[in-house]
Image (spheres, helix red, strand yellow):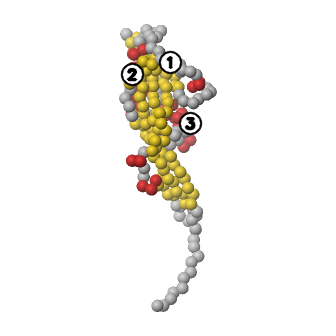
């Protein structure tokens, strides 16, 4: 499961401001980011987001990825010389599936732009960014874990509750690390006697 800081990093990497062209005109739009789920306070507690919206919601979290799991679950052993103790780090390779939806009201807006045109021109750059432009596969600020993004479904258009939307899913591959400190001896006092047989 991603931490709040890691979710914020993902959200900050997504494009939200776009120019939409229609019938000879160009109009600026900004997507409002809205996380679905159990929020009971703040902007995301509203019944519906402000449109146009970029809606994010978890389909699943911490799905095991056994094909990426290293032998013995071992990620790293740090055993410095001339110092007692070692640090053993085990890993669990997992992925989270995130639903991504770009939604607009299913009416012509004040600029006269049809909903299908707005939704298509707003969804395409978000999809392209997640398909290959957003790179979170490095350690983030404040120790945020690297994440590899993989598109797991194609954008699908639909009319839902007076909105026109494109929805697809991405997988965020990352790892859960478990650190164990192990005590070791700096030296040992051993004596042995030789015997003749």
> Residue 4 bears which disc, if any?
3
Q: Is there a contact, CB below 8 Å, between mark 1 and mark 2?
A: no
* Residue 87 or residue 20, whichever sits in front: 87
Real-space CA distance between mark 1 and mark 2, rounded to the nearest whole angstrom: 16 Å
Real-space CA distance between mark 3 and mark 1, rounded to the nearest whole angstrom: 24 Å
Q: Is there a contact, CB below 8 Å, between mark 3 and mark 2?
A: no
Q: Residue at x 56, y 78 (%)?
A: 190
* The residue positioned farthest toward the right in the image shown: 41
Is disc 3 placed on a helix, strand or loop? helix
The residue beneath circle 2 is 157
Is disc 2 placed on a helix, strand or loop? strand
The residue beneath circle 1 is 51
User: Which is more foreground, mark 3 or mark 2?
Assistant: 2
Real-space CA distance between mark 3 and mark 2, rounded to the nearest whole angstrom: 29 Å
Dot 1 or dot 2, earlier in sequence: 1
Dot 3 or dot 2, earlier in sequence: 3
Q: Residue at x 57, y 71 (%)?
A: 187
Q: Is there a contact, CB below 8 Å, between mark 3 and mark 1?
A: no
Q: Is residue 166 shown to the viewer in this render?
A: yes
């Amino acid at each position: 499961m991603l931490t709040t800081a890691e979710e914020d990093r993902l959200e900050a990497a997504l494009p939200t401001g776009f120019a939409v062209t229609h019938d000879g005109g160009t109009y600026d739009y900004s997507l409002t980011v809205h996380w679905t789920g159990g929020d009971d306070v703040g902007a995301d507690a509203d019944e519906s987001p402000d449109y146009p919206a970029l809606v994010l919601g978890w389909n699943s979290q911490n799905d095991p990825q056994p094909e990426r799991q290293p032998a013995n679950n071992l990620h790293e052993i740090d055993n410095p010389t001339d110092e007692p103790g070692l640090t053993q780090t085990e890993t669990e390779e997992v992925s989270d599936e995130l639903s991504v939806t770009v939604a607009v009201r299913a009416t012509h807006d004040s600029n006269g732009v049809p909903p299908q045109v707005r939704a298509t021109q707003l969804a395409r750059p978000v999809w392209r960014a997640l398909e290959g432009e957003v790179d979170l596969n490095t350690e983030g600020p404040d120790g945020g874990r690297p994440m590899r993004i993989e598109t797991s479904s194609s954008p699908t258009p639909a009319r839902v509750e007076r909105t026109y939307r494109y929805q697809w899913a991405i997988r965020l591959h990352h790892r859960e690390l478990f650190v164990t400190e192990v005590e070791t001896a700096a030296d040992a006092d051993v004596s042995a006697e030789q015997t003749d047989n």
